[in-house]
Amino acid sequence: MNALRTTIGAAMLGALVALAPGCGPKMTLPMGTQLIASGKTVNGTAPGDGMVYVYDTSTQKVLYQGRVIKGDRVSVVPEKSRIQLNGNDVEQHVLNINDDYQVRFMSQPQGD
C-alpha cells in the first residue's frame, strides 16, 4: 500500500511540474528567421504575416513565439518584465535589463 501511495504521489508531482508555468516544451529558434530589431529595449514591426520570436541573446533562450500579421508591433520592455504585441502584454518573464534581446520573424508559407 505504501509503495502504491508513493507511486501515485510521484506521478501527481510529475504532472504538476509538467503543467507549471515556464515548464512547458522548450521553444527553439528556427533556422532562417529574419532579425527585425535588437537591443536592450526592443521595438519591432512584423514585415509580413508569419511567426515572431523574442530571443534573449544573453541566455540563448526563446522567451516568446506567436503568430503575427503584417504591421503588428512587438516590444520587449525589460524594466517592466513584459513582452507586448500591439501594446498588450503577451508574456511576462523576469527580464534582465542588462541582457540583449532580439525580435526575429519568419514569414508564413504561401497558402496557409
Image (cartoon, rainbow, N blue to C red):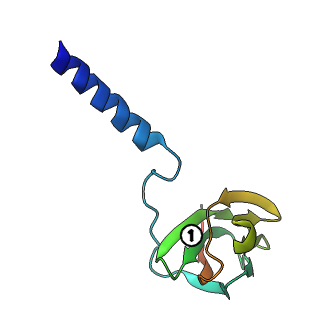
User: Which residue bears the numbered disc 1?
Assistant: 109
At 81% across and 65% down in the image, what residue appears? 86
* Amino acid at dot 1: Pro
Is 101 placed above or below 112 here?
A: below
Name the image quarter holding residue 34: bottom right
Q: Give the quarter of the figure containing the N terminus.
A: top left
SS of the residue at dot 1? loop
* In-image side of 65 versus 37 (left or right): left
Q: Is residue 25 visible?
A: yes
On the question of residue 75 being in view, the answer is no
- Residue at position x 36%, y 34% in the image: 13
Left or right position of 11 against 111: left
| Identity of the residue drawn at 61% across and 80% down | 101
Closer to the camera in the image, 81 or 45 = 81
Q: Image quarter for residue 73?
A: bottom right
Q: Quadrant of the C terminus?
A: bottom right
Q: Position of residue 60 (x, y in %)?
A: 46, 77
* Callout count: 1
Position above or below: 109 against 7: below
Vertical relation: 67 (above or below) 95: above
Q: Residue at x 44, y 68 (%)?
A: 28
Residue reaching furthest to the top: 1
Q: Of residues 2 and 23, which is closer to you in this image?
A: 2
